[in-house]
Amino acid sequence: MTSLLTIDHVSKDFDTTRALDDVSLEIRPNEFFALLGPSGCGKTTLLRAIAGFEDPDDGRISITDADGQETDLLALPPDKRPVNLMFQSYALFPHMNVRKNIAYGLEREGLSKQEINSRVDEVLETVGLVDKAKARPAQLSGGQRQRVALARAIVKRPRLLLLDEPLSALDRKVRAEMQMELKRLQHEVGITFVVVTHDQEEAMSMADRIAVMHDGRVQQVADPVTLYSRPANVFVADFIGSGTLLPGDVGATGFTALGRTLPGSNPSSVSGPAVLVLRPESVRVDGDDGVLDGTVVETHFYGGSSITAVRVDGVDGPVVSRDRGAPRHEVGQSVHLSWSADDAVILEAGSGADGP
Ligand SMILES: Nc1ncnc2c1ncn2[C@@H]1O[C@H](COP(=O)(O)OP(=O)(O)OP(=O)(O)O)[C@@H](O)[C@H]1O
Ligand SMILES: [Mg+2]
C-alpha cells in the first residue's frame, strides 16, 4: 500500500536535547495512527514538525495524494499544508457560540456563506452537537467542548488530522466514550488521524497501528496485538501492558534463569543476557506441575476473570496469572507456574534504552 505521509530520517535538536532522533514513519491513507510514549519523548515535536510549526534539522516529510503525486511538506508554510493540528491545550473562543467557533476557520478561508453553513451543519451532526449550536463554550461539558474542538478541526477537511492528547482533559468515563466516538468519527469522515497519547490503553483501543517512542526515537511500529505479544525490545515490553520481565541468559539450551531452562520464543535470536516477557494471560497456575515453583500471595476476582499473584524465590515482584472465572488457588498455597514457549518472548537485556 502506498503511504499518505512519509517521515524520512527526521531529527530535531533543542540546544542539548535531541527531541527527534532519526525518526522514520509511513502513515497510510485512512489510517488511525497513534504516537505513544512517555512525557518528553518527542510526540508533540513530531506533530509540530508535520504541521509546520517546527523545522526539523534533518530529514524529509512528504505527503502523497491519491494519484501518486508527492508533495514536500517542509517546503510549504503551515497554512498551505493539507494538515490540521489540534493542539495539546486547545482553546475555544469563549465569546462565540458553538456554530461560530466551528465556522471561524472556514470564514478565514473566505468560503461562501452557503458553503460554510452546509459544512458546519454536517459537522454538527457528525459530532452530535446539533442542539448545542447556539451554546457558548462555558455552557458545555468537558466532553462537549472536546467535540467542538474536533468539529473545528474536521470541518476544514484536511487530508491529515493531527491530534495532540485530544482526550487528556476529560475524566475517565467521558474519555472512554470519546475514544469510541473518535474512532467512529475517523471512520465516518475518512480522514487520516495521527493521535498522540501517553496512555497505552487509549492507543491500543483506538489505533490501527501505533508507533512507540522513547527519547526521540521510534522503538517499534506495529498493530496493537503485535506490540503486546511481540514487543521489539524491553522498553516496549515494559511500556505496553503488564507482566513480569524475568532477567536471565540465552545459551545453548535456550533461556535460563533461576538455575532452570524456561520456555520462551526467540524471534530476534538473542544470545547472552536476556529478558523473558511473561504476560498474565499466558501464565498458568497449577497445583501439580510446572516450570517454576512459588507461593500464592494474592488473588482477586473481577467478576468475569481473576488474577493470582505468585511469589517465586529470586524474582522481583510477584508473577501474575490472569484467568477466566474465580481464583482456583488460595493465598499461601504452594503452586507451579507454566506457560507455552510461543507465549513468552525472549528479548535482549536492556534493549530500547531503558529496562531492567
Ligand atoms: N521549544 C523547545 N525548546 C527547548 N526544548 C524543547 C522545546 N520543545 C520541546 N523541547 C524538549 O524536547 C523534548 C520533547 O518534547 P515534546 O514536547 O515533543 O514531548 P512530548 O512527547 O510531547 O511530551 P508530553 O507527553 O509531556 O507532552 C523534551 O525534552 C522537551 O523538553
Ligand atoms: Mg506533548
Image (cartoon, helix red, strand yellow):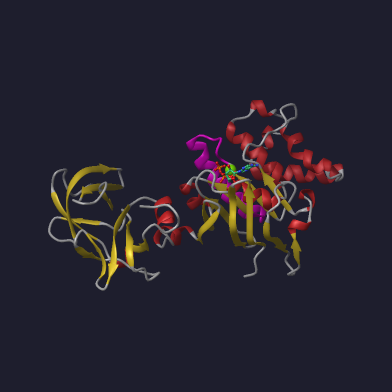
How far across and how far down the image is residue 65, in percent? Answer: 73, 64
Question: Quick one: 273 or 33, which is closer to the camera?
Answer: 273
Q: On the image, which quarter does residue 88 sit in?
A: top right
Q: Quadrant of residue 136?
A: top right
Q: Residue at x 63, y 29 (%)?
A: 140
Q: Is residue 2 above or below residue 58?
A: below
Q: Position of residue 112 (x, y in %)?
A: 87, 45
- State the residue in front, 150 or 272: 272
Is residue 122 part of the magenta span, yes or no? no
Q: Is residue 315 left or right of residue 41?
A: left
Answer whether residue 165 is visible to the viewer in this image: no
Q: Which residues are drawn in magenta? A: 167-192
Left or right relative to 333: residue 316: right
Q: Position of residue 23 (x, y in %)?
A: 59, 59
Residue 91, placed above or below residue 192: above
Q: Quadrant of the N terminus?
A: bottom right
Magenta span main SS: helix
